[in-house]
Structure formats: structure tokens, C-alpha cells
Amino acid sequence: MKKLIVLTMLMAGVASAQNAVSYKQLEKAAERMTEAQFKHHIKRYKGKTVLWVGWVVDVEKNWFGDKYQVQIDMDGPEKSEFGMMTDVTFDLSERTALRLRKKAKIKFKGKIHHIFLLLGTVNVSLKHGKISRRSLR
């Protein structure tokens, strides 16, 4: 029994260590902080790995190169009164890009490259973004 408890605690520690910050935590920080405070606060997250769930807004081909960019809404299609808005972006291959559908719920992972505010909304760009295989079925 003790081994099971220790193993469960270790697994929980790995899961939380993997997720540096949730998108909701970033939104709440942006709501309560001044812009200067928020810019200082988010520096700690650059390069940190996140594992999040969101909904596909769109996928577009990048201007340069052979990569595509996925645009993700973190609130879901039914929660926004103004329609889906892009909160998170990252590059992906053509093969993966062509498998995604608008409004599809996806689980994805990546390293935070940049966080900024745009019209009061937190926007995050990721590097080395990967979409869960289960999300592509």
C-alpha cells in the first residue's frame, strides 16, 4: 500500500512539474496586474513546458518555409460571445496541419516562447509544439 501511495505522489509531482503554468493562471495574473507587473511576472515562464487543452480556431501556412501554424482558443467555441479567438499558436508539419478540424478539441504540449497581451487577451506562442496523437483521431 505504501508503494502505491509513493508511486501516486511521484506521478502527481511529474505531472505538475511538467506544466509550468496553466493558461487560466496567466489570464488571472493579467487581470489583476498592471501591464508592467505582468511583463515582469511572465519572464519566469519563457522556455517552460506546458501541457494544455484548447480548440482549433484555424491552421494557416507560414509565409516562409514549409511549416504551418495552428491557432488555438483556450476557452472553447461555446464560451465566447464574440466567436473563437486565438490565444495560443505554434508551428507544425503539413501532415499534422491537414489532419486538424476547426473547433476540434486538442491536447497539446510545447515550450513557451513568448507571452504578450493583445487587446486585453493573453497570447502565447510555443516552440516545439506537439499535438497529442489521440487528438488527431
Image (cartoon, helix red, strand yellow):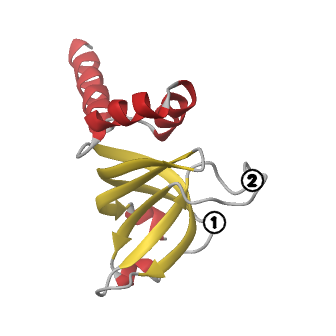
Return the disc, 2 or 1, that comes first in the chain's sequence: 2
Whole-percent x, y for residue 133 in the image:
39, 65
| Mark 1 residue element | loop
66 vs 116, nearest the viewer: 116
Element at badge 2? loop
Q: Position of residue 93 (x, y in %)?
A: 33, 79
Of residues 28 and 75, the one drawn nearer to the viewer in this rendering: 28
The foreground one among 27 and 35 is 35
How many angstroms separate mark 2 from mark 1 (CA)?
Answer: 10 Å
Q: Work out which residue is located at the far front of the displayed protein and give it.
A: 36
Task: Sort mark 2 into few (<14), some (14-19) or many (20+) by Cα contacts within 10 Å.
Answer: few
Is the C-beta separation of discs 2 and 1 under 8 Å?
A: no
> Along the horizontal axis of the image, is 73 left or right of 8?
right
Coordinates of residue 124 in the picture (x, y in percent): 42, 52
Q: Is residue 62 above or below residue 120?
A: below
Identify the amino acid type marked 1. Answer: Lys
User: Quick check: 5 left or right of 123?
Assistant: left
Q: Kindly identify which numbered label has been placed on residue 103.
A: 1
Residue 92 appears in the picture as rendered: yes
Q: Nearer the viewer, residue 117 or 17?
A: 117
Q: What is the residue that sits farthest to the right in this orientation? A: 81
